[in-house]
Image (spheres, rainbow, N blue to C red):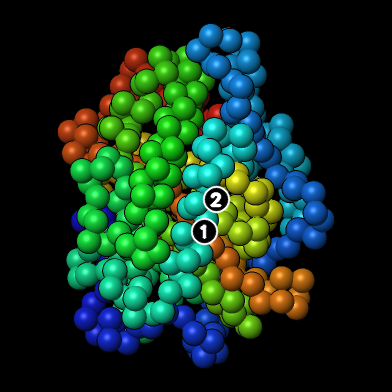
Amino acid sequence: MIWSLSLCPAFRRWWRPPVEPMCRQGISGQRWPPMLWLAKARPRYPSLTLRGCCWRRRRRRRRRLLVALNLHASMRPARSGASSSKSGVVSALQLINHGVPDDVIQGMKANIEAFFGLPAETKQQFAQERGQLEGYGQLFVVSEDQKLDWADILYLNTQPPEHRNTRFWPDKPDTLRSTLDAYSAAVKTVADRLLAIMSSNLGLPPEVVASRCSGGGMQSVRINYYPPCAEADKVVGFSPHSDADLLTLVLQVNQVQGLQVKRQDGTWVPVRPLDGAFVVNVGDILQGDDEGFEKLLKEISVQARATPYCARCVVHCVVEDGRRLKKKLTCGGHMSARRERERNNRGVLVHTEDMYAYSSLTVSLDIQT
Ligand SMILES: O=C(O)CCC(=O)C(=O)O
Ligand SMILES: [Fe+2]
């Protein structure tokens, strides 16, 4: 099973949500990408707006939007000491004015804050079970010796509703379930729009990418709590990784930095979260080469994800301004493909008719590092 790395019993006995002493356990010898920090208040990261873009009727606007999605190279990535290359190609962008109602976004944020603020025993009621990814805990745990990411996670299947296992859906705070229901539906709408735009971008009917890849809009959320750590340089919140999905929309619950995205030239770009924006990341499924597609068919292992080939995103724990310890909260909505479809339709994206479109996709999304 993909990502079948749930808690082994010994690990469950040992594991506790990260606490400060674990910091000192350290990750010596590990080399993380440099921790970068955007000091200026002005967001300096590519952003894209969807609002007012009725792309069915107003072709000109749609083209402009598609160009915006297309032209990563013309967008100016955040400047930092480490991103001095002229290439400017980034593999993610922040999506603003996406149409998800503010009360849904704010409700989600408040519920995430409230859930992680609950006592450990309460959160443990929703803990992952053996052989399962869903629930509260840590993903990708394979041994007791492993240095863990400095994070607590709540991982849930959210769409379609029949894929939910509500056993793991916290009923505390009592608004979390209904909020997550509304939120996941809204995120699905945004993802569908993006996929439709990508499709049109390729000169294909809008529904093609979604219907061939997402197979009905499978979605899970990975809600991340990166606790403050006094020795932030010794831990990492989310190890360098790519997303083994189609598309990820990450809501930054608070405006604490830490997320960095790898550019094509190998340098890392820190993301200054825009309030209410989604950081959109393109997953392995749209990687756009046969090898990427091949990955769909294989079991994806921790080892595979740990190769430099896949590393595109990292989340650092930060000591903001060098003084205050900050917790960071995010919610990643992951759009996946139906596995049965992938298996049955091997090669569906690379048959002759779509070959050109497929290679355009590679170029326009350009996420391989
Ligand atoms: O927490 C973040 O900022 C990034 C989350 C992420 O990369 C993911 O959910 O895949
Ligand atoms: Fe990710």
Residue, disc 2: 106
> Of the numbered discs in the image, which one, if any, rests on residue 214?
none
Question: Label 1 neighbourhood size at 10 Å, few (<14), some (14-19), many (20+)?
Answer: some
Image quadrant assignment for residue 363: top right
What is the secondary structure assignment of the residue under circle 1?
A: helix
Inspect the image, locate mark 1, and give the three-letter code of the amino acid beneath it.
Answer: Ala
Residue 26 lies, in percent from the top left, at: 53, 85
Residue 268 lies, in percent from the top left, at: 65, 55
Q: Are marks 1 and 2 in contact (CB under 8 Å)?
A: yes
- From the viewer's side, name the closer residue of 71 and 95: 95
Say above or below: 249 vs 149: above
- From the viewer's side, name the closer residue of 123 and 265: 123
Quarter of the image that includes the N terminus: bottom left
Say above or below: 38 vs 353: below
Inspect the image, locate mark 2, and give the three-letter code of the amino acid beneath it.
Answer: Gln
> Of the numbered discs in the image, which one, if any, rests on residue 110?
1
Please give left or right for residue 114 compared with residue 86 in the image. Answer: left
Q: Give the number of callouts.
A: 2
Q: Residue at x 70, y 45 (%)?
A: 45
Tell me, yes or no, if residue 303 can be seen here. Answer: no
What is the secondary structure assignment of the residue under circle 2?
A: helix
Q: Residue at x 50, y 51 (%)?
A: 107
Please give left or right for residue 360 compared with residue 260 in the image. Answer: left
Question: Label 2 neighbourhood size at 10 Å, few (<14), some (14-19), many (20+)?
Answer: some
Say above or below: 121 vs 127: below
Q: Residue at x 30, y 51 (%)?
A: 157
- Spatial CA span between label 1 and label 2: 6 Å
Residue 294 lies, in percent from the top left, at: 31, 42
- From the viewer's side, name the closer residue of 116 and 363: 116
Tell me, yes or no, if residue 40 can be seen here. Answer: yes
Q: Residue at x 48, y 18 (%)?
A: 200
Image quadrant assignment for residue 191: top left
